[in-house]
Amino acid sequence: MPKFLRSATVVCAAFVLVAAGCGAVATNLSVADGTYPRAVVAADHAIASQAGLDMLMRGGNAVDAAVATSFCLAVVRPYSCGLGGGGFMLVHIASDAPMPTQSVAITYRETAPAAVGPDYYVQLDTPGASRYGPHAVGVPGTVAGLMTALENYGTLDRATVLKPAIEAAEQGFAIDADYVASAGEVLDDIRAHPEWIDLVGADRFEWFYHRFLFDGEPKVGQTLRQPELARTLRLIARDGAPAFYAGEIGQAVAAACPQMSAEDLAQYQPRLSQPLRGTFRGRTVLAMPLPSSGGIATLETLGLVERRWMDVEQAAPQSPAYIHLVVEAMKHAFADRAEWLGDERFANVPATSLLSETYLDILARRIDPLRTQPPESYGSREGLPIDAGTSHFGVVDEWGNAVACTETINLSFGSLLPVPEYGFMLNNEMDDFLTVPGERNAFGLQQSQRNLPEGGKWPLSSMSPTIVLGEDGLVEVVVGGSGGPRIISATLQTLLDVVLHDSSAGEAVAAPRFHHQWMPDVLQFEDSWTDAATMEAMREFGHDVGRRGDVGVVQLIRRRGDGWDAASDPRKGGAPAGW
Ligand code: GLY
C-alpha cells in the first residue's frame, strides 16, 4: 500500500444537515426549502443554486441559469459530476417570445471510444478495469452538452454563465458534510482495495489524493481551491466546446486514456431530440428518452400505478397497500429495463411497445394487490406487441420556462483518474454497459446484450430528469435525482407524493423512501424509515425486505399558489435559491 494511504486516518463526519426556510415534514431529516414568487433554482449545493439565480436576476432564462449551475456544480461537487462526465437535460420553453414554445431533450451522455467493442473488458481480463482507471472512461459529453444548450436556447454569453464557476474554483469554498462523507467512503474503499491505485497509476492517484481527498483527512470547513480547473473554465469561456474537444484539454484527456483517441473526442456530438411524453392523472409528463432508462421506467411505472389506482384509492399515503402497488409497478419497469433497453442507435429497442396502452394493460392485469410474485413474472422476455456519482438540479424562470438536468461521472469521483493539469476527474461510465456477460454492474443491475459496449454507443442510464405540465399546459413540477437506479424510485416517489398527496416540495423530498429494482429481488427501506409495522406488512405481501442507507437524492420544484415551492434533498445538504 502506498505510504500516503498508510498514514491516513479515516474521517467519519456526522451528517450535518442544513436547515433553511419552512416546510413541515413527516421525517427526522431537516430540509432546505422555500417558496419563491418569480423564479427558482434547486441544486444539491447552495453555491450552485445561487450561481443559477444570479443569471436569472440579470435577465437570463432558465437555460442560462442551468448552464451556470452545472458549471458551478463541476466545482463544488467534483465527486458527482463535472467536465469529465456527461448528463441529460430536459428543456421546456413555455413562452412564445423570443423562442417558440417547445420541449427538447439534450443528451450528452459519455460514449464508448471507437476502440472499445463488445468483448473489450472480457479480453482485458483485469478486475475493476471498467470501474477504475483509464479503461473505465467514456468520451466526456458535459462541455459539448452545456455549450449546445446555451447556443440553442440561452440568451447570455459564455463568459457570463461561466463566471460564478470560475470564481468558486479560484477563490475556493468550504467543503461540507456531504463532501467529507463521500471522500471518506472513497478512502475506506481504497484502503480495502489498494489494487485500484495501480489501475489509476501512482502519479495521477497522488494528485487526486492530495487535491480532492485532502491527503486522507478531509474535514468540514476546509477550503478547496482549484486553480487548474479555473484555468480550464476560462479556456472554455474563451473558445467554447472546441477548447475541450479539439484543443489542449482534449489532448490531455486522450493522453490519460489509452483506448481513447483525439478522433473520439473530435467526433463527440450531443443529441437534441423530442422528450418522451406520457400522461398521469390529467397531467403531461415529459421524460428523458434513451439512452436514459429513467424516462421509460418512469412512464411505465406511472402507467401501471394509474391503471391499478382503484386498488389503493382509499389507502393512506405510505400505507402497505400503496407501497406494494408502487413496488410491483417498479419491478415490471426494472425487469423490462434489464431485458430490453440500450442505445437504440445500436440495438433494437422496443421503446414504443413498452409504453403502449396494450402492453401496460397486460402488465397491470398481472399485478396481484395482495402478493408479490417470483422474479420471472415481471416484465416480458418475449412476445411484446410488435410496434414498436450524479447530481440533479431544476430551474424555473419568471417566464415559466423550465430545465430539469441530471449529470454524472458515475461513481464517487468517477474512475478516480484525474486530468491534473486541467483539474477535473474523469468518469467511469463504461461500467454502465454490460461489460462482462453474466455479471452485474456497480449498482447490481442485470442488463442484456442490447447494452454491450460498442464504439460511439451510449451506455444505458437511470438518470430521470422530468418535467410535468398541468392540465393548463404550464409547468407544474420539475424533478429528478441522483443515486444510480435509485434515481428512478426516488424521483417517482417524490413525484407521486406531490401529484397524488399534494405534499409540499420539502415534505416530498424529505419523506423516507423505498427501492426495488427487480433484481436483486429485495425491497429496501431507507435507514430513516422507522415504521416497523409497514415493513412487517410488506413481508406479509411476500416481499424480501431489507435496509439501505438512502434511496437517492432529489431536487424538486412545484407550482403552488402564485409561486414556486422548491426543495433540495437533505440527504445531500443542498439548498434552493429563488427570487
Ligand atoms: N451512472 C449512473 C447512471 O447513469 O445511471
Image (cartoon, grey):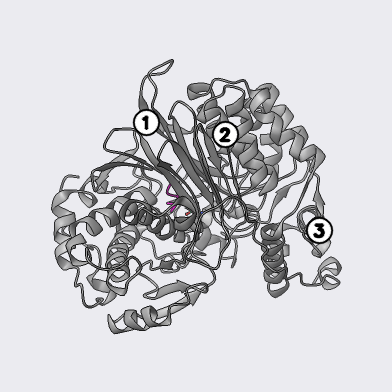
Report the amino acid beneath label 3. Phe
Secondary structure at badge 2 equals loop
Label ID, residue 579: 2
Label ID, residue 214: 3
Q: Is residue 483 left or right of residue 97?
A: right
Few, some or many residues within 10 Å of mark 3 (<14, 14–19, 20+)? some
Residue 76 x/y as whole percent: 69, 46
Report the amino acid beneath label 2. Trp
**Residue 232's image quarter?**
top right
State the residue in front, 489 or 1.
Answer: 489
- Disc 1 target residue: 103
Secondary structure at badge 1 equals strand
Q: Is residue 465 visible?
A: no
Does mark 2's beta carbon lie closer than 8 Å to ligand 1? no
State the residue in front, 368 or 349.
Answer: 368
Few, some or many residues within 10 Å of mark 1 (<14, 14–19, 20+)? many
The span picked out in magenta is 460-465
* Separation of marks 2 and 3 at Cα, in angstroms: 36 Å
Would you place residue 117 above or below residue 218 in this image? above
State the residue in front, 425 or 253.
Answer: 425
* Separation of marks 2 and 1 at Cα, in angstroms: 24 Å
- Residue at figure coordinates x 46%, y 68% from the top left: 444
Q: Is residue 70 visible?
A: yes
Magenta run includes residue 344? no
